[in-house]
Amino acid sequence: MKRFGFFAGLLLLTLFCLGPLVWQLITAFKPTAELTTLPPLLPSRPTLNHFAAIFAGHPFLRIIANSFVVAVACTVLSLAVGSLAAFALARLPIKRKGLILALVLCGSMFPPIATVSPLYMIIRTLAVRDTLLALILTYTSFALPLTIWVLTHFFRSIPRELYAAARIDGCTAFQSFRMVMLPLAVPGLVATAILVFIYSWNEFLFALTFTATAASRTIPVGIALFPGLHEVPWGEIAAASVVVTLPLLGLVFIFQRRIIEGLTAGAVKG
Amino acid sequence: MAEIGLQDVHKSFKDVEVLRELNLTIKDKEFFTFVGPSGCGKSTILNLLAGLEAVTSGAVFFNGENVNALPPGDRDVAMVFQSYALYPHMRVYDNLAFPLKVKKEAPEEIRGKVHGVAAVLGLEPLLKRFPRELSGGQRQRVALGRALIRRPRVFLMDEPLSNLDARLRVEMRAELKELHQRFPATTVYVTHDQEEAMALSDRIAVLNRGRVEQCGPPEEIYGQPATLFVAEFVGSPPMNVIDGSLLPHLPVSPSVLGLQDEGNLVVGIRPADVDVLSQEETGTLSAQVLLIEPTGNNTWVDGLWRGMKLKGRAVPGDPLTPGRPGFFRILPDRWHFFHKTSGRRVG
């Protein structure tokens, strides 16, 4: 009985979390006529028309490519800058580390809506409005606090002796970062990369503000601006959402093992 | 090869003074051990020698050259850590080769040296394994190999044996000593285990709260402890310490040694210098047997004498029973006298 209650609870929670996604999935395959009627819950004749529609007539592939470039560039940039900063904060003799970390965190505390107009001015002054660079720079600056915090804690969890051993074995601080600390931080890097990637992939507000044309439009904005003359094209929106969620799912599944894998096992006794 | 000099070395962390007035010379090819209870600053000394920490004041010399400003990589020292600190993402081969790769030695040369060291330490069959696939003893050997492979000027060892089980520890201890005899190099060793220090070292420095209490060869540290702290720290089981006020009841008179002021003395006697008999003899101390601990080659006996505990060694074949009287016979000339307030040895 107790077990039953446990599983019933699990089922309820799963339904609660997955509900919207499942609804989206069902909607994507429903013929337009059935979209706003219930029953049927499941489409009577599953159709791929919505999927065809999003690629025909819209620059949707271009928009996906834009999102991909922005997300990858932002992830790479965040990890490159963030891992160096985090390593320094975790291991190098720097004064006032706590203060630096607190300030870094402050940067991410402003609600995006509060920073959007000053950022817009900066973007315009830099003449990068409606380019992918505008989004890459903005996303990186918002992803860096998270990156630095997660990686600082990750580097700190790598036994101090390993860094000391590398230094004594002849490495400079940078060499010990590159040859010892970085390879050991791979699980942390992967986890952070996924978070940053998802953030850049899904971000809406800045993307809406800083882009004007399909040349730099990203997926969330692209989907929101699907042209509907007399009605909201729910079917297309659902189909597009399904299409763009797949890469994220793939990413997480591929790297899941890598994240969990305890690479540091055997470093020290235990 | 290197002679190490420590001149007036002080080290503080914030307000806490960890080391003070450290003045020492460690000779070339010497096996030198710092021993002391935890928190006495012994690991800090190694970090200072390695260059992982900077001295607060004073200077460290290698062969007469001040190395204060030299980063760890340029000091040509190797360190073996208590936790081994093997690189977990590298196979044994790459762990051993790492210091040479960093120095950009030629690959063929590296290969030769790795196999050479692996042969000495019996690591040949393990070269393709990862550290996590090794036992504690094997990891220890790899850590040792990674230090040996560079032929550094100085070996630093931070409690390298304390993570091993008792039997392996004794085996590795012998192996360390043998290695040092085969490839003599200046070795600075740190341990809290006085027995290990005695067994391995040419000279020992006993540290207490950041200060050297005594520095000398093991026999001298054991036979003529300079302070009460050293006397109690070195030797197992630890020395019996008897207050000077009980001197009139002891079969020894400090006045014979030309000492006065009996009330301000503390008397020490090692359990190994005390025989415990079941029959009274002249000059024995009569006590009540509390505890008998056979350890194989010795049987230690705790007795209660005038309200204090005395430890001695049972004479083989002389039966003692807890709760019954035992007679403690103290070997002449084995007394140690210390000044009560300063703890310094007298006489």
Image (tube, coloured by chain):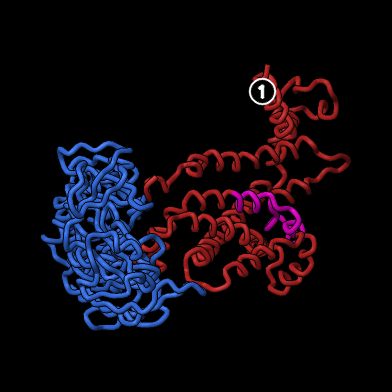
Residue A265 lies, in percent from the top left, at 40, 45
Q: The N terminus of chain A appears in which quarter of the rendering?
A: top right
Left or right of A215? Residue B153 is left
A199 is within the stretch colored magenta: yes
Of the pair B78 and A182, the residue shown nearer to us: B78
Q: Can residue B284 be seen from the camera position used here?
A: yes
Q: Is residue A157 above or below residue B68?
A: above
Identify the hue of chain A.
Answer: red
Task: Specify the quadrant of the image occupied by residue A172.
Answer: bottom left
Q: Label 1: which residue? A: A7
Chain identifier of the blue chain: B
Quadrant of image for the C terminus of chain A: top left
**Chain identifier of the residue bearing label 1 in the image:** A
Residue B72 seen in the figure: no
Q: Is residue A246 above or below residue B46?
A: above
Tell me: A38 left or right of A265. right
Q: Is residue B310 above or below residue A54?
A: below
The quadrant where residue A43 appears: top right
Between residue B335 and residue A229, name the one nearer to us. Answer: B335
User: Percent x, y for residue A104?
Assistant: 64, 65
Per the image, label 1 sits on a secondary structure element best described as helix
Depth check, front residue: B227 or B155: B227
Number of marks in picture: 1
Query: Residue A59: within the magenta?
Result: no
Q: Residue furthest left?
A: B182
Q: Is residue A145 left or right of residue B194?
A: right
First to last magenta residue range: A195-218
Can you give x and y, in whole percent of width and height, for residue B41 in the image?
Answer: 38, 67
Query: B299 or A233: which is nearer to us?
Result: B299
Q: Sort mark 1 into few (<14), some (14-19) or many (20+) by Cα contacts within 10 Å.
A: few
Q: Toward which corner of the image does residue A153 lie, by quadrant?
A: bottom right
